[in-house]
Image (cartoon, helix red, strand yellow):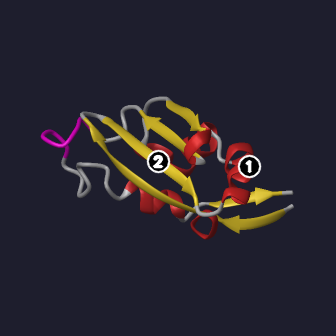
Amino acid sequence: MKRIKLIDIASARSGDKNNVCNIGVMARDPKDYPLLKKYLTAELVKEHFGPLIKGAVDRYEWDALESINFVCHEALDGGASRSMRMDTLGKNFSSHLLRLELEVE
């Protein structure tokens, strides 16, 4: 197994919908998309964020765009108008996710 940084093979964007954070992860190169599909799981994303995501993480693959979308429930401490967090809109979740290192074969 070797470790690769997610930021080296993908870009990401994130934002909010009430208390839900949405994170889109896009392969930088089509050859890297299979790595994302195989190793970047909803369970790994939830583990990476630890207590920031209190609910489930759903994963949706979008093969035509070589992208994966993660919907993180109960991730924004109530949402933008109720949260005391610095990032009430979930904009930094994508940067935080790109710090993840994947263990790949």
Location of residue 61 by image quarter: top right
Q: Badge 1, how many Cα within 10 Å: few under 14, some, many 20+?
A: few
Does label 2 or label 1 sit earlier along the sequence?
A: 2
* Residue, disc 1: 34
**Furthest residue in direction bottom, as rendered:** 8
Left or right relative to 18: residue 69: right
Q: Secondary structure at mark 2?
A: strand
Which residue: 73% across, 58% down?
31
Q: Amino acid at mark 1?
A: Pro
Q: What's the magenta region?
A: 77-83
Left or right relative to 81: residue 64: right
Indicate whether residue 57 is drawn in magenta. Answer: no
Indicate whether residue 82 is drawn in magenta. Answer: yes
Q: Amino acid at mark 2?
A: Gly
Q: Badge 2, how many Cα within 10 Å: few under 14, some, many 20+?
A: many
List x then y, in percent, for residue 102: 70, 58
Which residue: 19% across, 49% down?
84
